[in-house]
Image (tube, rainbow, N blue to C red):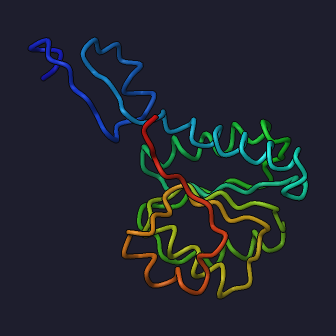
Amino acid sequence: VGEKYGIPMVTAEANSPVIFARGFKWLVGADRPAPQWGEDYYRMLKSLMDAGTLPRLKTVAVIQENTPHTMDVGWGGINRATLAGLTVVATETVPPGVTDFSAIIGKLKALNPDIVYVATWAGTAAAFAKQAFELGLRPKELHIPHSTVTEKSYGLVWANIGEGIPGITPEAH
């Protein structure tokens, strides 16, 4: 519509680089590109580790839900890990809305990554967090970009296991 009529179209949540690579003249995004979410997170980790506030972490495993946005967030989780000096030890892509993570959790327990980066929608991430807790997966950091306290899925697990799970909250500057 914006291109056809020359009217700016502001997208609050559209943040896939694929959308903006199409050369639209009238499209403006209000959110950071999804792959940059990983970049911001890893720069924060590096800063905390360099300051001695956080112990030196070495490995990360990335779980990504197979939807366009979460795959973009997962791409950043995988390809920007080196910014914090991390090595990616596992990458798992799961179908949308999956609820059984037992096989992946078993694999991750054997690998024992310092960080598990969960690039999924909130409901899927809540299911993963709950099962990880129940099955004894205890990474030093469980990072869930889509962990929002207003999401009803987290009401089921947050009181018991939500402490220390960082996420991303968009803000305006």
Q: Which quadrant holds residue 21?
A: top left
Residue plotted at (75% across, 42% down): 81
Query: In this picture, is 17 found above or below 58?
Result: above
Residue plotted at (41% across, 76% down): 153
54 left or right of 19 in image: right
Q: Nearer the viewer, residue 129 or 40?
A: 40
Which part of the image, by quadrant, shows the N terminus? top left
> Please, which residue is most extreme toward the front here?
173
Q: Which quadrant holds residue 145?
A: bottom right
Rendering coords of residue 6 (x, y %) = 14, 11
Query: In this picture, is 16 found above or below 127?
Result: above
Residue plotted at (73% across, 57% down): 61
Q: Nearer the viewer, residue 9 or 131?
A: 9
Rendering coords of residue 113 (x, y %) = 81, 62
Residue plotted at (57% across, 42% down): 37
Q: Nearer the viewer, residue 134 or 160?
A: 160
95 left or right of 105 in image: left
Rendering coords of residue 76 (x, y %) = 62, 40
21 left or right of 134 in image: left
Rendering coords of residue 159 (x, y %) = 54, 85
52 left or right of 104 in image: right
Q: How many marks?
A: 0
Q: Which quadrant holds residue 84?
A: top right
